[in-house]
Amino acid sequence: MSADTPLHHVCDCQKICLIGDFGVGKTSLINRFVDRQFSDQYLSTVGVKISRKLIEVEKAGTPTVFQLLIWDIEGSTKFKTIAPTYLQGAKGAIVVADVTRPETLEHLAEHIERFTNLNPQGVFVIALNKSDLIDPEQLDVLLKASQNYPLSVLSIYSTSAKTGIHVDQLFQTLAKHL
Amino acid sequence: MSKIMHRLENLTTEENLSQDEVDQLHQFLNLLVDLDIIEPEPTIAKEIEKEDEFPIEVGLHLEQLPSFSMQINFPLPPPPLETSIETNETQFQQLQQLLMGAELRILNDLIAGSRQQVLRLEHQIYDPQELSELLLPRIGELLAQKVAHSKEEMIEAIAPIIDQIIQSRTQQNRQSMGNALASSISPAIAQQVALNSEELSDAIAPTMGQAIKKQIFLEQDAMVDALYPIIGNTVGKYMGATLDAINEKIEQTLSVEGITRKIRAKMQGVSEAELIIREVMPSQVQAIFLIHKASGLVIAEVQHPEQHLESDMLAGMLTAIRGFVNDCISQSGDLPLELDSIDYGTSKIVLEVAGYCYLATVVKGEPSAAFIKMMQSTLRHLVCQYDPLLHHFDGNSATLPEDIQKALEILRDSGESAAEKGGKPSALFFCGLAIVGLMAVPWSIFQYLGFRQQQAESAAVAALYAAPQLSIYNLQVEAKQDYLSLSGRVPNGLLRQKAEQVVAVALPKWQVKNEIVAVEVPADPVLAAAEVQRVTRVLNRLEGVAIATRYHHGKVWIEGTISPLIEASHIPQSFAQIPGVLSTLSTVQVQPLRIEVRFYFEPDVSSLHPSDRGYKLQQVINFLNHYPRQSLKIIGYSNSPTREPGSEQIALDRAHALKQALTERGIDPSRLQIQGSTDLPPGVDSTQPNWLSRCVIVEPTAP
Ligand SMILES: Nc1nc2c(ncn2[C@@H]2O[C@H](COP(=O)(O)OP(=O)(O)OP(=O)(O)O)[C@@H](O)[C@H]2O)c(=O)[nH]1
Ligand SMILES: [Mg+2]
């Protein structure tokens, strides 16, 4: 704030989380969005990894810039759910499913519920990821079928961390409503 | 044979042999028959065949003579023949003599010669030296053949002596044996490790210690390099474990330094070992972060100008680790475990948690106990003062009061000054001690008191500095034997009182002697005006405050708006405390909170448009969650110029639809009050499109 402490932290930061089953492509989506990269290798995330990106969105007509702190949280498995402390204090979450694994789509609602219990005001966008792996008609069917989500779900995108399609929109939409 | 007989017969007749000669010949023939050299006359042969069930075979293989395998076979017991073997033999010799007197001699010579050869061969076989010479050129080939042919046999044959072979070879020439084995040693060990590492460790273990010692002796640097990567972690643990040992050692050393250190340790209530470590490693505060506990967002920070840390990432990761410790390591049932510090290299991150936030300080070296206490009191102060603000921290640090930042700066400065002060007096102390060794006790008491006083002083100063109204006055704190003396000047008695209170809270164990003077300073209009401006800025930083002020002749005019959540009387009070302000005049208006959301409807429809259930609805919910004490008035509108009957009901239904939607999203219905109206909604007139008046608006109301 004052001139004599140039290192003083003035920051508008927002925390968001990526949640979903293991291997659906959470880490890959973040890598695509933050570093513009994709790798075929699967390195399962352990615990959390935090990335950040300066983001500009239009809020109520005026462009605002803020720091997005993106928490990449380890995927849940049959035996292990996400630790609640990692989700606390996040304004929103990107919930990810893998279009080639139907069970990951079924778990979307559970993830939304768990997050909402901790952050009642939380908002979501859903990413139906790996859309490059199925044909467009099938994708349409999936998108149409997944409509019964709570109102806190702002939007549903079919994404691909590999081709990059809809990845920016995914993050932008969420950021806009934080 | 019969031909021979015939010829014999013929001979007798044709050549006129004497009877003697014929007899002799007959004898010879019989002998030949006996010896089976010729066949007898058929009749005779038959006769013999009958009796001769066990024929004697005498095979004399003359052509094989040079060889030494002369065979005489007696397959079965000698037959009951009229001719015994002896007679046979004599006959045989006779025959030999008869037949080949001269050749026999040659033959004998030959046999003797071969016997010689045989003997030589035997000698060669039994004398190892000779044998090896004999076999040497062929042995490789032979072995290879044998191995290819039947490996097992070969192995069996060599196995019993292989160790001896190696042993004796090693004795003969260690070097060459070493060379031969060298290349296969490491794979051999690797294999053994894979197969049975335990056995190997058992084997090596006893000499391991010695081996390492020796290696250290030989090549210390290389050893250090090799061990360095693991030593860092180990040393920490090792240090902890050996602190006691160090203490014990010191106990016995009666150096001057040792004694003084001992006294200081007693006085300060820390172990000597800790003191030694502290002496060697002065600490330095590198960064302080105040972090929101739940989200891990940085609320405020101060950093070392040269080594800037990535605060956002650091805070996030720290928070994740803290969460992990709380969640996963703590046993269920127990209180959650707290992460106190994280050590890395020679630095350390010390954590103090309270309320909705925690302080994380990055310190190089070992932080002093005094500094940790300071951290605790700073955090306590911040939590007491700003708890709700910290709780609802939404990531934007610009919205927070400057004092929070100030408090961290004070904490950092106190950490630095403690480090500086820590060094000098102790050096002085040692000098004094060297001169008057016996005076150690009073000196060290002095030293201890000095330390304790220092600590109290800096804590009190920090507390005063952190109190918003007091931070601008230059107040001094002096710690005496058993009390703290406050001095300085403040413009009124209220502030004087406040200062005493602040110090008492920060240092509950100390008596406070308040020597602060409240002076009615003759108003300096310039200072007062500046102060009014400063307070105005501070107040405007609070959420919901938008005021402007004017100062003139001791009077402050205040105008503007504040939100209903702020106690309106606080505003003029804040100005009244300023020296030089004699009166205040406030025209501040309480501005009602507003939510600028309208829900629009199709004609004659009273259910919410599906698209409105997303973002718009969320905004209302956000508002209600943000102001939990606020209620909402939901007003439905259905204006029709013709005043149709039923339009009032539609208006009410529209309001009800929104209430319903909010209730479904978890809002307590008692906070929602509905109302219908057929008037035009506020801000809409009849010239505007009709759809604008088919709407629901929400108005915050006090509970
Ligand atoms: N074809 C294709 N492959 C993808 C896509 N996104 C991710 N993958 C692959 O899927 C695998 C898993 O991706 P990650 O991003 O590591 O998955 P994750 O959700 O972070 O997994 P966890 O950390 O274990 O929960 C990797 O091999 C990626 O290369 C995509 O859009 N298309
Ligand atoms: Mg991952």
Image (cartoon, coloured by chain):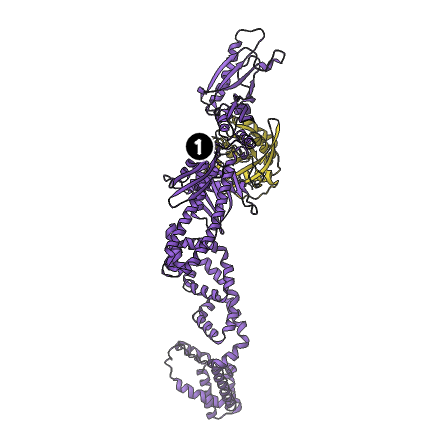
- Is residue A148 shown left or right of residue B263? right
Residue B589 placement (x, y as % from top left): 53, 21
Residue B642 quadrant: top right
Residue at 45% across / 87% down in the picture?
B92
Q: Residue B328: x and y, percent?
A: 43, 41
Quadrant (top left/top right/bottom left/bottom right) for the C terminus of chain B = top left
x and y, in percent, of residue B239 in the image: 42, 55
Residue position marked by numbered label 1 in the rendering:
B493
Residue B245 can be seen, yes or no: no
Q: Secondary structure at mark 1?
A: helix
Q: Chain of mark 1?
A: B
Q: B170 or B657, which is in the foreground?
A: B657
Tint applied to chain B in the drawing:
purple
Q: Is residue A60 left or right of residue B664?
A: right
- Name the one closer to the observer, B85 or B515: B515
Q: Colour of chain A?
A: yellow
> In the rendered image of this protein, does residue B603 appear above or below residue B133?
above
